Image: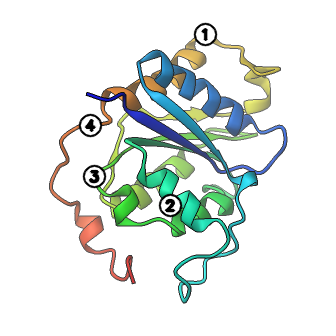
Amino acid sequence: MTQPHVVAICGSLRDHSYTRLALEHALAGASAAGGTTELVDLREYDLPPLDADYDEQGDSAELVRVVDGADAVILGTPVYHGSYSGVLKNALDYCGFDEFGEKTVGLLAVAGGSFPVTALEHLRSVCRSLNSWVLPHQVAIPRVSSSFDGDDLVSEDLRERVERLGRDAVVYANIEPEPPTFESGENVGADD
């Protein structure tokens, strides 16, 4: 059996992104569990706002290829206005059932303030509508600037939770899919 390949998508464009740093720790956990890893840094992709009249725009074909080639995906986002970033939303809009259907997905959110749970709930709903298998374990990092010292997580407990997300992505990468979710059946026009 080949090593599971885990792709993490960073929904932040900041140069010093806590989301990206946290995802690197999650990918370290995936690597320690025997997976191969890849970080999708959306700063490196030309992804104009999706225009559904075009099959491809900018680097969308490359993004779709990378996500499609993953056995598991970890989505990471900063919290903006109680939800996930528009950058991540736009990237996900280029993907669909072919890339996410029956695929294991892990979720991670960071916030400058209080608990970033709504962003995780919103991402979980999006992934379920694409018929993904979303890991029960998710990571929320509130007051993120105080959670890092340079590139390192200051709390051993938090570091363990972030690395576990990566390990779980490897362990459950090839879980047998369940029947399609109700949400995916109601996702009318998803592949129009």
Identify the amino acid type marked 3. Glu
Identify the amino acid type marked 1. Glu
Q: Position of residue 153 (x, y in %)?
A: 69, 18
The first of marks 4 and 2 along the sequence is 2
Which residue bears the numbered disc 2? 64
The first of marks 3 and 4 along the sequence is 3
Nearer to us: label 3 or label 1:
3
Estimate how packed mark 2 is, as few (under 14), some (14 to 19) or many (20 or more) residues with alpha carbons within 10 Å.
some
Tell me if residue 174 comes above or below residue 35 in the rendering: below
The first of marks 3 and 1 along the sequence is 3
The first of marks 1 and 2 along the sequence is 2
Identify the amino acid type marked 2. Val
Identify the amino acid type marked 4. Asn
Nearer to us: label 4 or label 2:
2
Which residue bears the numbered disc 1? 156
Q: How far is mark 1 from mark 4, CA to CA?
A: 29 Å
Q: How far is mark 1 from mark 2, CA to CA?
A: 35 Å
Q: Nearer the viewer, residue 45 or 169?
A: 45
Q: Is 120 on the left-hand or right-hand side of 4?
A: right
Estimate how packed mark 4 is, as few (under 14), some (14 to 19) or many (20 or more) residues with alpha carbons within 10 Å.
some
The quadrant of the rendering that contains the N terminus is top left
Q: Position of residue 91 (x, y in %)?
A: 59, 62
Nearer to us: label 3 or label 2:
2
